[in-house]
Each structure stands twice: as structure tokens, then as C-alpha cells.
Amino acid sequence: MNVALKSAHRVEDVQSPGLQVDHITVTYKNGHTALRDASFSIPAGTITALVGVNGAGKSTLFKAVMGFVPLAQGKVTIFGEPAATALKRNAVAYVPQSEDVDWNFPVLVEDVVMMGRYGHMNFMRIARAEDKRAVDAALERVGMSDYRKRQIGELSGGQKKRVFLARALAQDGRLILLDEPFTGVDVRTEEAIIMLLQALRDEGRVMLVSTHNLGSVPRFCDRAVLVNRTVLAAGPTAEVFTKSNLEKAFGGVLRQFILGGAELHDDEDKRKVTVLTDDEHPFVIYGEETNGEKAGK
Ligand SMILES: Nc1ncnc2c1ncn2[C@@H]1O[C@H](COP(=O)(O)OP(=O)(O)OP(=O)(O)O)[C@@H](O)[C@H]1O
């Protein structure tokens, strides 16, 4: 039994395209190519983990999908449409990494969430009743209604994350990109965010979540994309999250512990427990192949 891969999820809507990234290359102005010939596709109604070492190109991939950085090559298709068309229709919501936000900017929580509605408004940006309703509902859904009149900079890390999630909900994006949503949040908030993502998946949305919490991935992500300056592997989590793929993606960065033999069993059972981690949430493999040999009984 593979303990970590037990949690199979609902059937994906494989007929319905979500996000398709075809052979994209992104080169920054300073000449650094952060992604080269990267390709993967994910169907609608799924949660996909985006996993890789620091500097692997995860944020760059998000920026490429959002059209924030130009593509030197390749194309991005969202729900069967060119990315630019989907972005214009507000189909894509982005929850940035905390470090990318200026928290000193004086703005109320409810105003941050209302920003999610801007794309639905005309150029005067006058909120209509339906915009206000969407903001109320989004704040309610993330449990932040009581904080709506607070300055965003006064909130805790986990509360800020929830406010940015509410902004994505208010936007009603069908593709939601989340850049490290669990960094700096406690376990309860992480659980709440995971439950919210699962509910959004069941509404047919697509979530792409970058994370260093390897252990959480098989629990709530249907699929995974491993990156290191290109896409190394992509597909259902059970197929992608293998020891050899993770070693390929993380190289020497990954810490690895193997428990076996007398440490684990008092009988002839030869299965070993392998713990892989690049963070505080390890990925645990029980009885999978190790070093080319079958570790099962
Ligand atoms: N604006 C920029 N100009 C030049 N190089 C950049 C720029 N932004 C990122 N890079 C470089 O591109 C590479 C990929 O960075 P990126 O931020 O996409 O990585 P990441 O996988 O999100 O990392 P982390 O896990 O640390 O958030 C890095 O080598 C980084 O230094």
C-alpha cells in the first residue's frame, strides 16, 4: 500500500479542457531563460500542484499564464481559448505570493476584495449591487466578514491569504492560480483553504497551486506538475509523485530518510518507509521501489 497516494479524487472532466501550456519559453529582460519548452495540460474540475525547487520557474509560469511576462515561444490556451481572450473575460484569478504584495499600501480588506470585481465593471469602476453582493459572499466564504473594515496590512499572514482568496472568489475566475497559499499559515487555515479549493473544484473550476508542502499534495491535488526550468513530469499525482521523479525535480535539495528492517518491522516484512521533504511537510512512501529493487513483500 502506498500510504501517501491513497486519496483518489472525483472523476475529472477530461473532455473539458482547462489550462494548456504548449512549449513555452520565458526569457527575462536580463537575458535569463527561466522556462524553456515547458508543456502540460490540465482538465477542468481539478486541483493541480506545481512543485519545484526555489527558482525552478513556478512564479514565472504563473506570470506567463497571466500575460505579465511575454512568451519568447509557445502558447497558453485557457478553456479552449487563447490566453489573452480568457484573461479579457476575467476567467483567470491570481492569488500572489505574500512577498509580491506591498502590505503598507493603505487599503481596506473590502476594497482588496472589490478589486476582484474591477474587470466586471466599466471604466468608471462604480460598484453595482451585484458587485457588493459578490464581495459580501466572498468574504463570508473565507470567514473574513468581520475584518472587512480593517487595513490589509494589519492582518496576520493567514488572514491576508484568505482576503486574497476572497478577491479571487469575487472575481469568479474559472482558473485560479495560487502562488504558495500555505506559506506562513497555520494548519487550521491550511485545512480551511484546502476545503475551499475542493469546493471550487466541484464547481468545475481549475486550480493550479504552487507549494513546497510535498506531503499535502497527494492528499488534495488530483494532478501534479514538476518543474525545474522546464516541465519534468505532469499528470495524475499517483503517476507523477514517485521517488525518482521527485529526486529528478529536487536533486540534492530533497532530504530523504528511509526506515526499514528491524527499525520498522519485527517480522520478515521487507517494506520500507521513505520520507522525502524539502519543507516541513514530508512526502511519505511506504513499500514503493527503492534504488531499483522492489521494496514490497
Ligand atoms: N524579473 C526577473 N528578471 C530576471 N530574472 C528573474 C525575474 N524573476 C525571476 N527571475 C529568475 O527566474 C528564475 C525563476 O524564478 P521564479 O520566481 O519563477 O521561481 P520559483 O520557482 O517561483 O521560486 P520560489 O520557489 O523561490 O518562489 C530564477 O532564477 C529567478 O532568479
Image (cartoon, rainbow, N blue to C red):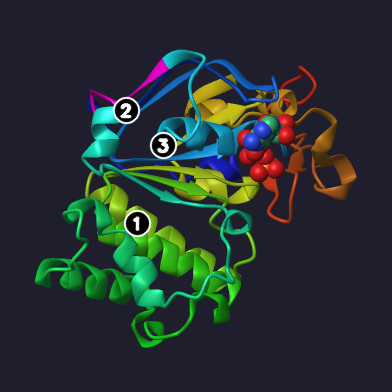
Q: Which mark is residue 24?
A: none
- Whole-percent x, y for residue 39 in the image: 48, 17
Q: Main secondary structure of the magenta part?
A: strand
Q: Which mark is residue 66?
A: 3
Residue drawn where x is 34% and y is 75% of the image: 110
Q: Amino acid at mark 1?
A: Ala
**Could you tell me which quadrant the C terminus lies in?**
top right
Q: Is residue 202 left or right of residue 54?
A: left
Q: Quadrant of ligand 1?
A: top right
Q: Which residues are magenta?
A: 75-82
User: What secondary structure is found at the residue carrying circle 3?
Assistant: helix
Q: Which mark is residue 83?
A: 2
- Whole-percent x, y for residue 211 in the image: 59, 47
Q: Residue furthest front?
A: 124
Q: Which mark is residue 168?
A: 1
Q: Which mark sits nearer the N-terminus, 1 or 3?
A: 3
